[in-house]
Amino acid sequence: MDYGKDCDHSQCTNPNASVCQTISEMDWERGLWYAAFYGDHQRVGDLIIKARNAKELVNTPDNAGYTPLHYAARKGYTDICKLLLQNGAQIDAQTKSGQASPLHKAAVAGKIETIQFLIQSGAQINKQDADGQTILHKAAINKHLDLFNYLLETYNELAIVKDNKGHTATDCMSNKNN
């Protein structure tokens, strides 16, 4: 037997090689979360097809409490959001600590098209995270003026919602110390 024949020995001497990766990190990189985060539509589809239970797979949170839909929404990969939803992803899934929905993540990143798609697909626009913030708050805090104006004009009922500190989204837009 020729041990090490197929081994890449350069990784043993390469100071930049990541040989100290945790099991959790390896799971994340091999999982659906990574494919959704990086917009790898083909890999997302392949992983779903190979899954014993696609609905369980698309709704499994990572160690940070994010589902693949959170990652795809945050990055604005509407096509991947659609694929995940078609396979049973929970549209209003919340992260463990911040109780943020995929819609919140898309709003933080200013992804208007993804937000429109998620809302058309049934996402709750008035959902508040652990800080009491709506998607309008997230648009304001992150200074996404186009998104803020779109949401304010289209869903003006969000304008009166106050977060846990008593601030409306308009307050957050004008406050430099969010």
Image: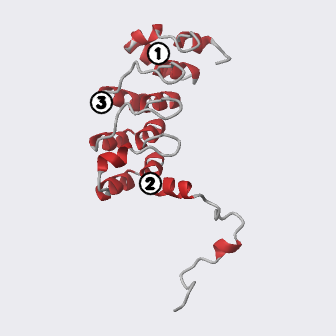
Q: Give the residue displayed 40% in from the left and 45% down from the top.
A: 60
Is there a contact, CB below 8 Å, between mark 2 and mark 1?
no
Residue indicated by mark 1: 149
Q: In terms of secondary structure, where does tag 2 sit?
A: loop
Precedes in sequence: disc 2 or disc 1: 2
Disc ID at residue 30: none
Name the mark nearer the viewer: 3 or 1.
3
Query: Where is residue 85 shown, x and y percent of the image?
Result: 31, 39
Drawn side of residue 81 relative to residue 149, left or right: left
Name the mark nearer the viewer: 3 or 2.
2
Q: Which amino acid does label 2 sit on?
A: Gly
Give the crowd class for mark 2: few <14, some 14-19, many >=20 residues within 10 Å.
Answer: some
Residue indicated by mark 3: 121
Cα–Cα gap, marks 3 and 1: 21 Å
Drawn side of residue 30 relative to residue 51, left or right: right
Name the mark nearer the viewer: 2 or 1.
2
In the rendered image, the vertical position of residue 25 relative to residue 168, given as above or below: below
Q: In terms of secondary structure, where does tag 1 sit?
A: helix
Q: Give the residue displayed 67% in from the left and 73% down from the top.
A: 12
Cα–Cα gap, marks 2 and 1: 36 Å
Give the crowd class for mark 3: few <14, some 14-19, many >=20 residues within 10 Å.
Answer: few
Q: Give the residue displayed 44% in from the left and 38% down from the top.
A: 70
In the rendered image, the vertical position of residue 17 relative to residue 38, given as above or below: below
Q: Which amino acid does label 1 sit on?
A: Asn
Q: Which amino acid does label 3 sit on?
A: Ser
Q: In terms of secondary structure, where does tag 3 sit?
A: loop
In the rendered image, the vertical position of residue 79 relative to residue 150, given as above or below: below
Query: Where is residue 151 shown, x and y percent of the image?
Result: 43, 17
Residue indicated by mark 2: 31
Cα–Cα gap, marks 3 and 2: 25 Å
Precedes in sequence: disc 3 or disc 1: 3
Q: Give the residue displayed 52% in from the left and 24% down from the top.
A: 130
